[in-house]
Image: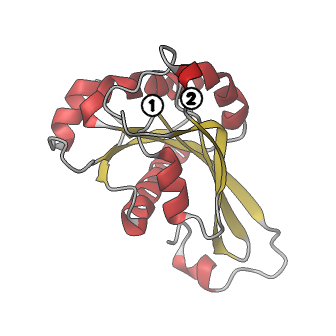
Amino acid sequence: MVFVSSDYAATPPADVPVVAVKMLVAGGFGVGKTTMVASVSEIAPLRTEELISELSSGVDDLTGVERKSTTTVAMDFGRITINRHLVLYLFGTPGQDRFWFMWNELSAGAIGAVVLADTRRLDNCFAAVDFFERRGIPFVIGVNCFDGAQHYTVDEVREAIDVENVPIVLCDVRNRESSKEVLIQLTEHVLAQTAG
């Protein structure tokens, strides 16, 4: 995955310090945030998952993800080294409403975000879209195409979410190349926003 010009990636100046870039992977509960971070991270990702217990019954909405047995309670963390001077840090946010207080902290210093969406529960991504729009953080929407879910076109998803100048990418976050493509689209979007 190359996020910088090929000239710079091939021969970066020796006196250039390491730059760390932070991106978020956000979205509703059970949409695939932990899976996406794990699929692209070059290190074993840090996970803060706990078992879903009876205490969360009536608090967490398991509609559509009834077989889910764990939940992220703080964040996921992964890393991708682009070259010896550029490192990408990925932070996956918790999905349940009761852990959203973490989003403000996690979004500090982020240059962009991926909002993952599940077409079976598309309304679960609306709050994440609103969060990044209000803060002026560039984002793309990654539509995680789950097995057995009805597939929709990008235009149909765009109309349902009601966003205009936001890239929408159909993906399978279990697949490293698919997750990388979403991050490439995000990087290009961030660069276009910065240049404009």
Number of marks: 2
User: Which amino acid type corresponds to the residue marked 1 in the rendered image?
Assistant: Gly
Relative height, residue 23 to residue 41 (above, below): above
Query: CB of mark 1 within 8 Å of CB of mark 2?
Result: no
Q: Residues within 10 Å of mark 1 (few under 14, many from 20)?
A: many
In the rendered image, residue 192, in percent from the top left (x then y), is placed at 47, 48
Q: Quadrant of residue 171?
A: bottom left
Q: Is residue 18 above or below residue 168?
A: below
Q: Which residue is mark 2?
A: 53
Task: Tell me if I can see residue 91 in this picture.
Answer: yes
Q: Residue at x 33, y 22 (%)?
A: 123
Asked where in the image residue 165 lies, by quadrant, the reply is top left
In the picture, measured across the screen, residue 77 lies left or right of residue 131, that is right
**Which residue matches tag 1?**
28
Please report the residue visible at 23 percent of the width from the left and 25 percent of the height from the top: 160
Q: In the rendered structure, which amino acid carries the disc numbered 2?
A: Ser
Q: Is residue 82 above or below residue 119?
A: below
Q: Is residue 115 above or below residue 46?
A: above
67 lies left or right of 90? left
Q: Position of residue 149 (x, y in %)?
A: 19, 42
| Residue 1 location (% of width, % of height) | 50, 72
Cα separation between marks 1 and 2: 19 Å
